[in-house]
Image: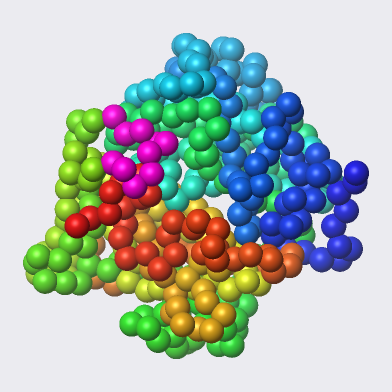
């Protein structure tokens, strides 16, 4: 079976085209079957394979294969089957993924961590053969996918088949310009504040749309969480079953308008604005460093069509969870301060099922920053 896209069309491939790609072996898993449940509206959840390698350091293969570099730099081999293994905080690991690619000419791919991965402060990125870049997979690539995993705040337990990241396929020019974003927002709002669309002329745009922090509240209001030092082991296969207290301490605003971030501490905060991703678009939260270099917000992450969206307009967007870390000095951030950016892409076609529409989406209409592993507060 061949994988042939509609002639002349451009955009991110929706779920039904991802199924076509799997049927045509453009995405395959060797002797394993790719579960249909792993196909999201505009992305595919990728699965950990059977082994992990404890590495001396991170790397890019350049003109070499990932396997040749792995053999030079590995310290130990770990078995991910059955009960899985513990990955230590602060150490890089390399894990071959079950999914592989045999992309036709004209089709490229991109990978990003799943939202729950970033919220657990687990840094991941995909490596491919012959590449000088992480997560960007060239047009027509044929070969394996390898995931670099670095737990930063907590030691974690992972197992075979766990999904820590996602893959998108796209063809042609997909990204919306700032003018495109503003024009789309005029006819179909993308950003809301207090339940109302933000005026198009008030959007903060610079190769994408900026969001600000929600730090407003009385002293007792919890505005986010900070990762505890020396926390216990976090099992990433647990869903809504891990107590919050051993891993997180609550964060409250100072004077109801600001907080001071401790150097190198990891924070989960919430956006002030609410975002809607309509069926015709997909989005990506891009990692953002202000010019000062004192702050990093949000690991890159995909927002699938349907996030914060309802056909009737009953849902005026969903707020976005932001992963924030100051670098070397205490750094103050204030309510409304713009700290992250969304870029938007055209879909090749609208997906048949949207994010949140009975497909088990974890973060539709979210009001809490904690990831899906943890028991809901209260």
Q: Quadrant of residue 186?
A: bottom right
Split into 4 quadrants, where in the image is the C terminus? Answer: bottom left
Q: Is residue 80 above or below residue 368?
A: above
Query: Is residue 9 inside the magenta stretch?
Result: no
Q: Is residue 275 above or below residue 46?
A: below
Residue 157: image location, x then y, percent: 38, 28
Query: Do we see residue 182 in this rendering?
Result: no
Q: Is 61 left or right of 202, judged from the image as shown?
A: right
Q: Is 5 left or right of 109, judged from the image as shown?
A: right
Residue 51: image location, x then y, percent: 54, 20
Residue depicted at x 42% and y 60%: 363
Q: Is residue 4 above or below residue 82?
A: below
Q: Is residue 349 above or below residue 118?
A: below
Split into 4 quadrants, where in the image is the N terminus? Answer: top right
Q: Nearer the viewer, residue 352 or 138?
A: 352
Q: Is 131 left or right of 320, judged from the image as shown?
A: right
Residue 146: image location, x then y, percent: 60, 30
Q: Quadrant of residue 355?
A: bottom right
Residue 257: image location, x then y, percent: 17, 70
Residue depicted at x 60% and y 81%: 184
Q: Is 329 left or right of 194, judged from the image as shown?
A: left
**Which stretch is magenta?**
233-242
Query: Do we see residue 364 in this rendering?
Result: yes
Q: Nearer the viewer, residue 298 or 13?
A: 13
Residue depicted at x 17% and y 48%: 249
Majority secondary structure in the magenta region: loop
Residue depicted at x 51% and y 74%: 309
């Amino acid at each position: 079976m061949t994988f042939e896209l509609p002639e002349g069309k451009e955009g991110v491939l929706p779920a039904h085209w991802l199924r076509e790609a799997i049927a045509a072996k453009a995405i395959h898993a060797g002797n394993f079957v790719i579960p249909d449940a792993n196909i999201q509206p505009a992305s595919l959840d990728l699965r950990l394979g059977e082994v992990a390698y404890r590495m001396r350091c991170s790397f890019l293969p350049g003109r070499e294969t990932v396997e040749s570099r792995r053999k030079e730099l590995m310290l130990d081999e770990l078995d991910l089957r059955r009960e899985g293994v513990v990955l230590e905080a602060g150490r890089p690991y390399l894990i071959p993924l079950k999914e592989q690619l045999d992309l036709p000419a004209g089709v490229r791919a991109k990978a990003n961590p799943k939202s729950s991965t970033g919220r657990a402060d687990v840094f991941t990125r995909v490596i491919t053969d012959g590449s000088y870049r992480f997560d960007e997979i060239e047009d027509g690539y044929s070969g394996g996918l390898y995931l670099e995993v670095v737990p930063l705040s907590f030691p974690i337990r992972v197992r075979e088949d766990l999904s820590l990241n996602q893959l998108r396929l796209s063809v042609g020019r997909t990204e919306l310009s700032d003018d495109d974003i503003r024009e789309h927002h005029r006819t179909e709002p993308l950003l809301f504040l207090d339940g109302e669309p933000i005026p198009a002329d008030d959007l903060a745009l610079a190769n994408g749309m900026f969001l600000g922090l929600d730090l407003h509240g009385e002293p007792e209001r919890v505005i986010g969480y900070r990762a505890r030092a020396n926390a216990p082991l976090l099992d990433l296969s647990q869903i809504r079953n891990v107590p919050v207290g051993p891993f997180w301490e609550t964060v409250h605003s100072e004077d109801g308008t600001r907080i001071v971030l401790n150097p190198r501490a990891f924070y989960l905060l919430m956006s002030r604005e609410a975002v809607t991703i309509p069926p015709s678009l997909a989005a990506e939260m891009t990692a953002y460093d202000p010019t000062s270099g004192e702050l990093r917000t949000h690991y890159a992450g995909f927002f699938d069509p349907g996030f914060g969206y309802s056909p009737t307009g009953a849902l005026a967007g969903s707020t976005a969870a932001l992963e924030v870390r100051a670098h070397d000095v205490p750094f103050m951030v204030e309510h409304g301060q713009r700290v992250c950016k969304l870029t938007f892409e055209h879909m090749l076609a609208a997906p048949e099922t949207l994010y949140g529409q009975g497909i088990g989406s974890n973060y539709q209409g979210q009001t809490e920053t904690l990831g899906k592993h943890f028991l809901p507060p209260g």
